[in-house]
Image (cartoon, rainbow, N blue to C red):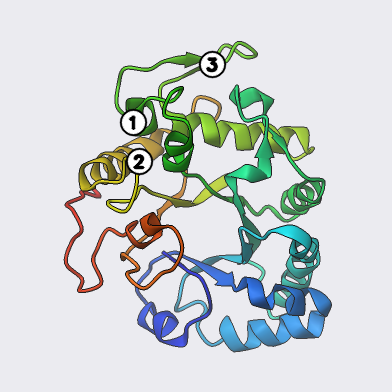
């Protein structure tokens, strides 16, 4: 499970559930955490120590899809959080940040992937030093929506019919998701952090609100994702830890109408469509 800020009620509800958790620091708090180790220590004391280990906090995300000048706060925030967790005896919790896929440039073919900005090299090398994974939000939906001429719906939704060969390394791709994830792996190699794992901190497909956004397509994509990630990608044939976005449709969310329809459940807790996790 992933929650996007340290909500006390949600954390309390997760006690002794065994559910692994990504706990975000809100982007609005990132600069404060980056400013001093004491700020990071206070955040850990208030939001981690009262719940861990009864709540299985696996990762702390220092920001989600951070943009612009705020990206300069990511590495110092991660460093301060690592120091605060270590001082509190909570060093088993790994600190990372969650990136948008456009943090990777030259993503086709996958082997050409490289980080678009230099700060990501510092992020990658810090992760390599701490043994933490890179959290990546990967959405084939948006790639397909923006380029349906060159990307087939089957390729974007784990359906058969498309095969794409990476001429640089001979790997063959039958799903856009794999190609996107392997572009992130390629970028990590180029950043000097080949051992850093990738955790998919968000992926999903909207069931309403825009082009190709339907319950059928959302079900096909998310069921395909669930069935697929245990086998990894062509570059990394190992289980890929993956979080589906989102548990609930966010009917009050602003912005693109599709943003309100990524949930597996409606706000009244009824299923948006049927899905099987086993």
Report if residue 61 is visible in the image: yes
Q: Nearer the viewer, residue 199 or 92?
A: 199
List x then y, in percent, for residue 98. 60, 56
How packed is label 1: few (under 14 Cα within 10 Å), some, or many (20 or more)?
Answer: many
Q: Are marks 1 and 2 in contact (CB under 8 Å)?
A: yes
The residue at 60%/26% (across/down) is 110
Label 2 SS: helix
The residue at 66%/84% (across/down) is 43
Residue 225, which numbered label?
Answer: 2
Position above or below: 75 against 81: above
List x then y, in percent, for residue 19. 38, 66
Which quadrant holds residue 132? bottom right
Position above or below: 222 against 173: below
List x then y, in percent, for residue 260. 35, 62
Q: Earlier in the sequence, mark 3 or mark 1?
A: 1
Residue 171, which numbered label?
Answer: 3
Q: Nearer the viewer, residue 152 or 121?
A: 152
Q: CA distance from mark 3 to mark 1?
A: 17 Å
Which quadrant holds residue 264? bottom left
Of circles 3 and 1, the one toward us is 1
**Is 39 left or right of 161, judged from the image as shown?**
right
Q: Are marks 3 and 1 in contact (CB under 8 Å)?
A: no
Q: Earlier in the sequence, mark 1 or mark 2?
A: 1
**Residue receiving disc 1:** 158
The residue at 40%/39% (across/down) is 229
Label 3 SS: loop
Q: Are marks 2 and 3 in contact (CB under 8 Å)?
A: no
Q: CA distance from mark 1 to mark 2?
A: 7 Å
Q: CA distance from mark 2 to mark 3?
A: 20 Å
Q: Earlier in the sequence, mark 2 or mark 3?
A: 3
């Amino acid at each position: 499970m992933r929650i996007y800020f340290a909500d006390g009620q949600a954390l309390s509800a997760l006690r002794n559930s065994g559910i692994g958790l990504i706990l975000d620091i809100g982007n609005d708090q990132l600069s404060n955490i980056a400013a001093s180790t004491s700020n990071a220590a206070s955040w850990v004391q208030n939001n981690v120590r009262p719940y861990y280990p009864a709540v299985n906090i696996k990762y702390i995300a220092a920001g989600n899809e951070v943009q612009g000048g705020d990206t300069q706060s990511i590495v110092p925030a991660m460093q301060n959080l690592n120091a605060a967790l270590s001082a509190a005896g909570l060093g088993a919790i790994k600190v990372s940040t969650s990136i948008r896929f456009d943090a990777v440039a030259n993503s086709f073919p996958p082997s050409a992937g490289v980080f678009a900005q230099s700060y990501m090299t510092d992020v990658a090398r810090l992760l390599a030093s701490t043994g933490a994974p890179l959290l990546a939000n990967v959405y084939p939906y948006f790639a397909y929506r923006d380029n349906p001429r060159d990307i087939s719906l089957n390729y974007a939704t784990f359906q058969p019919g498309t095969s794409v060969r990476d001429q640089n390394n001979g790997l063959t791709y039958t799903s856009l998701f794999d190609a996107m994830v392997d572009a992130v792996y390629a970028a990590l190699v180029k950043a000097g952090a080949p051992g850093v794992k990738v955790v998919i901190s968000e992926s999903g497909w909207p069931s309403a609100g825009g082009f190709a956004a339907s319950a059928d397509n959302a079900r096909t994509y998310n069921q395909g994702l669930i069935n697929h990630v245990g086998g990894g990608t062509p570059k990394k044939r190992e289980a890929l830890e993956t979080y589906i976005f989102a548990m609930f449709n966010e009917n009050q969310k602003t912005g693109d109408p599709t943003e309100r329809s990524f949930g597996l459940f409606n706000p009244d807790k009824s299923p948006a469509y049927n899905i099987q996790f086993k």
